[in-house]
Image: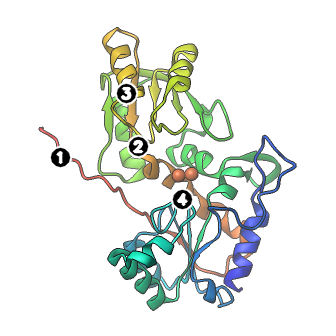
Amino acid sequence: MKISEVIDNLISYERGYWPDDPTKALGHDTDRDKILYGEKHIDDECTGIVTTCWATADVIEEAHKRGANLIIAHEALFWNHGDHRDWLEESQNKTYLAKKALLDKYKIVVRRDHDHIHSGIPKHGDPNTWVDGIFYGYAKELGWEDYLQTDLGIPMFFKFPKPITARELGQHLISKLHLNGCRIEGDPETPVVKAAIPYHNFGDAKDTITMVDKKGIDCLFGMELIDFTLAEYIRDSSMLGKNKCIVQIGHFNTEEAGMRYMINWLPIAIKTKDIPMSFVQSGDMYHFIAVN
Ligand SMILES: [Fe+2]
Ligand SMILES: [Fe+2]
């Protein structure tokens, strides 16, 4: 099967429109979802597929080692929305040139799958029930499917059958997702029953703070964490006895679970089991040093 056919099959398996506007199809390509590199090789025979969150230099090396010439990545390749390269060409950025040389050497195609996988995959193969492929995959990888209160997208809510501490939740995330560590805001011994993955935290957090307060959320699995707004609120809440904490592993470490889970449904989506396919972890980008 050609690389282009693999991609076409994948796209037609995914929902392809945002649930709030079924009239507007995403189409084959979007600002994000397109061939990020290797356009000239898309009609090559696909020798293997690697799924990953972010196609780092190490992921590219590993894909080649595994004989794969197609990388399906959730995030951008060249560090900006839309993967624009004009600014990098113009400045002859040295890291860009080195990464490009690596891709050229191995004749690797990188396709981004962001909007399509978030738009939906059929739950358990049933095309009448759509779930966000990334966040549903996160719940599956953590063994939390039964605790899910929502199926699609973020904010995503969980209710645990009995209290579990922030520390235990952090340890579970570290071991299931193969991470170096995690950060906890508030008391690590906070007992958690109601948890949520909030919407991206880009600064203003009024909506998330209101949601946490109104819904009685004990724990947020933060993707981004900045010191002002949400983190301040959680710390004050904890100090005032409001039983609130943040367990934070990072944006990529969170979403990576969905790309790991993708390997389970990819053969059905692309209509073949004959192409070798595997997940390569982009890896925790954080190294933690602690006082004890
Ligand atoms: Fe993302
Ligand atoms: Fe995402």
Task: Specify which label sits upstream in the sequence, 4 or 2.
Answer: 4
Q: What element carries label 2?
A: helix
* Sooner in the amino-acid sequence: mark 4 or mark 3: 4
Instruction: Kindly identify which residue carries mark 1.
Output: 289
Q: Nearer the viewer, mark 2 or mark 3?
A: 3
CB of residue at label 2: within 8 Å of ligand 1? no
> Which residue has dot 3 on it?
231
Left or right: residue 210 compared with residue 238: right
Can residue 269 be seen here? The reply is: yes
Q: Mark 1 vs mark 2: which is more N-terminal?
A: 2
Residue 290 at x, y = what percent?
16, 41
- Residue at 76% from the left image edge and 67% from the top image edge: 28
The disc placed on residue 173 is: 2
User: Pointers 1 and 2 in contact (CB under 8 A)?
Assistant: no
Amino acid carrying label 3: it is Ala
Relative to residue 181, is residue 39 depicted above or below? below
Q: Earlier in the sequence, mark 1 or mark 3?
A: 3
Of marks 1 and 2, the one in the foreground: 1
Q: Which residue lies furthest to the right in this view?
A: 23
Helix, strand or loop at disc 1? loop
Q: Is mark 3 within 8 Å of ligand 1?
A: no
- According to the picture, the residue beneath numbered tag 4 turns out to be 81
Q: Which of marks 4 and 3 is in front?
A: 4
